[in-house]
Amino acid sequence: MFEFKTKEEYLEYRSEWKEKYARLSKSLRIYRQCCNANLTIWNKAMLMAFGSGGRDYYEKMSKAFDIHKVLLTEKTENHKKLESFIASNEYVKGSSADATAMLEELKEAKLESQRQYLEQKKMQVA
């Protein structure tokens, strides 16, 4: 899968991999922060709706949705951060599974690089 002819090729691969992984990791972190902020807003809306009197569950849920809409118009810091990050072209669409796959790829590359290095050493000694 990996064919590194020189140490420099491997180091270049590692450098590119680190950049790509850093962008993916940052994207996932900011996305999660935004989701958590949205959940916080939803919980606040639910508390406001259900904290008031009345028995009708559906009426309270409707009120919670209305409150949530109003609260979302007041963008949180995390939403602003996500929007500016996406606009900056650094945003990478991906998932945790993509990050895990990248880590596996790096592990394989390291093993292959080590195998090739040992093979070279063996040939030099012989």
Image (cartoon, helix red, strand yellow):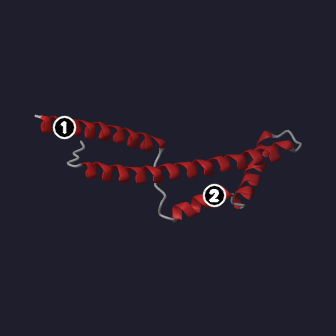
Residue 77 in the image: above or below residue 109: below
> Horizontally, is 50 left or right of 9 in the view?
right
Disc 2 residue type?
His
**Contact (CB < 8 A) between labels 2 and 1?**
no
Neighbor class of circle 2 (other Cα within 10 Å; few <14, some 14-19, many 20+) is: some
Q: Quadrant of the N terminus?
A: top left
Depth check: give the residue in front, 35 or 109: 109
Figure quadrant of residue 75: bottom right
Q: Residue at x 54, y 61 (%)?
A: 85
Instruction: Say whether residue 93 is visible.
Output: no
> Horizontally, is 60 left or right of 103 in the view?
right
Depth check: give the residue in front, 49 or 109: 109
Kindly identify which residue carries mark 2.
Answer: 79
Residue 63, horizontal then vertical, whole percent: 78, 49
The answer for how far apart the CA atoms under marks 2 and 1 are is: 53 Å
Q: Quadrant of the C terminus?
A: top left
User: What residue occupies the far left of the structure in this picture?
Assistant: 126
User: What residue occupies the far front of the structure in this picture?
Assistant: 125
Residue 9, horizontal then vertical, whole percent: 26, 51
Figure quadrant of residue 125: top left
Q: Residue at x 35, y 38 (%)?
A: 107
Q: Which mark is residue 13?
A: none
Q: Residue at x 46, y 51 (%)?
A: 22
Q: Regarding mark 1 in the picture, which secondary structure is present there? A: helix
Figure quadrant of residue 98: top left
Instruction: Say whether residue 110 is visible.
Output: yes
Neighbor class of circle 1 (other Cα within 10 Å; few <14, some 14-19, many 20+) is: few
Residue 88, horizontal then vertical, whole percent: 51, 65
Kindly identify which residue carries mark 1.
Answer: 121
Between discs 2 and 1, the one toward the N terminus: 2
Residue 47, horizontal then vertical, whole percent: 80, 44
Disc 1 residue type?
Lys
